[in-house]
Amino acid sequence: MASLDDVARAAGVSTATVSRALSGRGRTSEATRERVRAAADELGYVASATASSLASGRAENIGVIVPLMDRWFFATVLDGIAARLAPRGYDLTLYNLTDDPAQRRRLFETSLRRGRVDGLIVLSVALTDDEVVALETLDLPVVGLGVPRGELPALRVDDTAVGRAAAEHLLALGHREIVHIGQSVGAEVAGRAPAYDIPTRRRAGFEAAMAAAGAAARFVESDFTVDGARRAAVARL
């Protein structure tokens, strides 16, 4: 594998110049940068992540805390994150968060403190107060996706508006016999915080739109899977 010294010899410059040219830090002429980059490409030189991190203080790596890796929703979101990071030269590290208290403790108290990432994305997980405090003490930028905690900057879908918009669309097409299929047993019964109870919030939006139109809001309960919804729809039809 080619080294920094090999690139320097090929480009006819010092190793310090090569480092400045490839990192973009420090003063180097454009002609020199191009010569160094060409030599690096020809030799197949790849900068050591460890060395770059020591020099720049950045890992060029973003961590994503995710609860389930085998669901299409999470896979789609991760694909979107990776698609934005890759062109910028950033890697992605996944941290799976389970319901096991010991595993969660190791993640927040050890794994996330190893300095391997420059920032964290927390993807649709229910965090305890202690876990939020642990994130705040990491001295890293953190953003949540679907994480309704006021302490963290976050992006969320308004699921009540989603249910309302779906119903209003069908109502606008002239339909009145509309059935909402979903998993909605109420946050208290399910043991979830209301902000995490997506099915119930979607049902609330659906029922609000139907009431506003003077139409009956019909609901059929199903498990929260595509196959479960298909079976419920076929039975209803």
Image (cartoon, grey):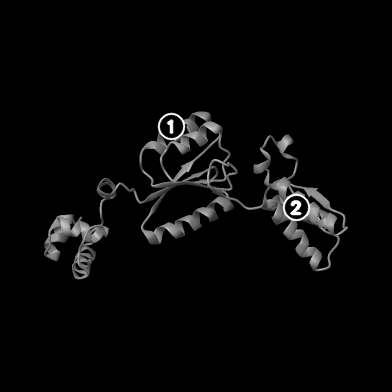
Residue at point 47% right, 34% down? 134
Residue 30, horizontal then vertical, whole percent: 22, 69
The single residue placed furthest to the top in the displayed view is: 102
Residue 205 is marked as 2
Pointer 1 residue: 109
Dot 2: few (<14), some (14–19), or many (≥20) neighbours within 10 Å?
many
The single residue placed furthest to the bottom in the displayed view is: 31
Left or right: 225 as drawn, with respect to 28: right
In the rendered view, would you say 75 is above or below 138?
Answer: below
Dot 1: few (<14), some (14–19), or many (≥20) neighbours within 10 Å?
some
Cα gap from disc 1 to disc 2, whole angstroms: 39 Å
- Which type of secondary structure does the marked residue at label 1 adopt? helix
Left or right: 214 as drawn, with respect to 29: right
Residue 230, horizontal then vertical, whole percent: 73, 55
Q: Considering the image in quadrants, where does the N terminus appear?
A: bottom left
Residue 76 is marked as none
Q: Considering the image in quadrants, where does the C terminus appear?
A: bottom right
Residue at point 84% right, 53% down? 217
Counting the numbered discs, the total is 2
Residue 101, horizontal then vertical, whole percent: 52, 29
- The earlier-in-sequence mark between 1 and 2 is 1
Do the residues under discs 1 and 2 have CB atoms within 8 angstroms? no
Residue at point 47% right, 38% down? 135
Residue at point 81% right, 64% down? 171
